Amino acid sequence: MNAVKMSDIVDKIKDALHLSGYVSRKVRLSKKKNGAFLGLCPFHGEKTPSFHVNDEKGVYYCFGCQAHGDIFEYVMRSENVSFKDALELLADAAGIKIPKNGDDKAQEVYKQFTSIYEIVANYYRRKLTSVEGKNALKYLKGRNLSPATIEEYGLGYAPNSANELLSILREQFSEEDIMSSKILIEGTYGIYNQFRNRVIFPIFSRQGAVIAFGGRSLDDTMPKYLNSPETPIFAKSQVLYGLNFAKQHITKERKVLIVEGYMDVLALANVGILNAVAPLGTALGAAHINMLWRIVDCPTICLDNDEAGQRAMVRIAEEILPHLRENKTLEFVLLSGGKDPDEIVTKRGQGYFQSICATAVPLSQLIFDHEVRTSSFTTPEGYASLKKRLNKYSDSIVDRDIKNAYRRFFSNKHYELSLFKKNIKYDLKERRGVGIINLTKLSFAEQVSVMRVLEELKNAPELLYDDAIYNLLYTVSIESDCLDSLRGLILDLKVAGNNNQEVAQITISKMLQKYYEENSEVVLYRNSHCAEYVEPNMESADRIKREIKVLLLHLLRPEINRISELLIAKCDNETYKYLNKLKCYEMELQKELGIHTIHELITV
């Protein structure tokens, strides 16, 4: 094992294990206000604790006997073993495999593999600009990648035939060495290249050596994306694509974006966002996060805006909770305006994407929002179940102070949720007046939007139980009595109706009748100014979603104006982030509705 490889393994172990966690197996530790831990020294007898452990720096120090060091020195001293034995013990605890062929053999393998991979990488680069690679180059240009980005990241093309590459490698290496590197595969009909007819993405170590490849199919061959098999120098769970290019920018900006794939990293780099990395054909895991925590305190997760991406964000949030420690956390970007970073920066530009990233939500909020979205809390039992699940998240956190902080956060949010439910409660049986939602402060066009929402619910009361429609009302937080009332009405119709659509339908009909009687001017305005824009064959669920989006767009503009004035007065980052979030959502709604300015809503 050469010096670089030994250093890599040591770093991986330190990434995977907290010193305090290992020490606490034998020493009872208590956490201090500064984040360090304190306990009785295991190396000399004492009654007053003087043994300090600092996870942030990864070191321990005893003020009594001056014993000090990192996790390796702690194990060597406490277990009375050599460095080699300590390495094996800690690697086993971290679940990391160590090559067993000896240092000289490992050094030889590493040097040989990287030499082979560098030759192959250069071959693929040349092929990209050859006649054979014209379709691959056309594909990359079609993805709007500049020649500079293609060159910087060493992109290439693997032709169908493996013969030429095999001949080049045979000039310097034996066939046994070539096959052991797994560059080429021995098949039933001879040697072939698993990456044939694919765009090639070289995968680099943190030190910049080519250690593997990724390939994107140019035809219908599946899988669409393919990575090199694991070798003695490449383990997917220990590598992040683009980190060798991004680490300098990550250190400088103190920020890293974790995206889903190669093309997201490249598309961002193409527009000057140089601090993005991506996992390689494996789920983003705690080992990746621990690796990045050595560089930044709060990595930003920015996965695709689809169901799989949303599930992945929740999964990593759950997985990382036991690893949280002071000042080490995550934040999450909820994408809008496109399905992934690649599509967003290509269609909307760098500024739009960065404004979305500025609205990233903390780990704690992501978990709470997920539970609220996926829970039924319309009964006491539902509320109790929600609280129990939130407590389960808190209980998985090892750090005592952070565990307690999460408990308080979830408890407060749960209480706020119950207050919200209480404040918007409607009594459908004994309501003195049906017109509960106050429309008098709204413009005529805004009042029409509310009426249309209610009319759609009257015609299709089953939509009250469509969570997608209910969640749409919570897409963005706007200070609006009208919106709060509408949210509350829909929630309470669901509860009080108890799936009795007839009750809900009668209630909405009475409410609308009262609106029509008391707001004849609005009805007249609607008939003369507001065109019916929905397609005749549009489904009821799609119609009401559009009505809600129109209403949200009406309400967004005054909120944006209010927050703009507030920003002038406060000049703080939180207000700036909130304003950006509102503007991004306004742009997204305008595009979805086919509206360029707020004035066009007059005829909608």
Image: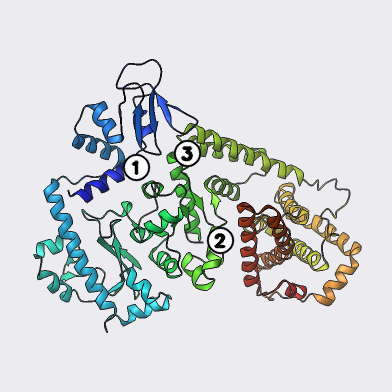
Q: Which residue is mark 3?
A: 326
| Residue 594 placement, left or right of 601 | left
Q: Amino acid at mark 1?
A: Ala
User: In the drawing, what numbered circle is on residue 222?
Assistant: none
Q: Could you tell me residue 270's position as x and y percent?
A: 43, 70
Report if the CB atoms under discs 1 and 3 are less than 8 Å apart.
Answer: no
User: In the drawing, what numbered circle is on residue 356?
Assistant: 2
Count neighbours of disc 2 (C-alpha within 10 A) and say few if under 14, some if 14 to 19, many if 20 or more.
Answer: many
Count neighbours of disc 1 (C-alpha within 10 A) and say few if under 14, some if 14 to 19, many if 20 or more.
Answer: many
Q: Earlier in the sequence, mark 3 or mark 2?
A: 3
The residue under the point 40% across, 52% down is: 284
Q: Amino acid at mark 2?
A: Ile
Q: Could you tell me residue 481's position as x and y percent?
A: 77, 53
The residue under the point 16% across, 69% down is: 191
Q: Which residue is mark 1?
A: 16
Report if the CB atoms under discs 1 and 2 are less than 8 Å apart.
Answer: no
Report if the CB atoms under discs 3 and 2 are less than 8 Å apart.
Answer: no
- Front residue of 130/484: it is 130
Q: SS class of the residue under badge 2?
A: helix
Q: Name the front one of labels 1 and 3.
A: 3
Taking the image as drawn, is residue 96 in sight? no
Q: Earlier in the sequence, mark 1 or mark 3?
A: 1
What is the total number of numbered labels drawn onto the structure image?
A: 3
- Front residue of 453/286: it is 286
The residue under the point 17% across, 63% down is: 115
Count neighbours of disc 3 (C-alpha within 10 A) and say few if under 14, some if 14 to 19, many if 20 or more.
Answer: some
Instruction: Single out the residue that lies furthest toward the bottom.
Output: 131
Q: CA distance from mark 1 to mark 2?
A: 31 Å
Q: SS class of the residue under badge 1?
A: helix
Q: CA distance from mark 1 to mark 3?
A: 16 Å
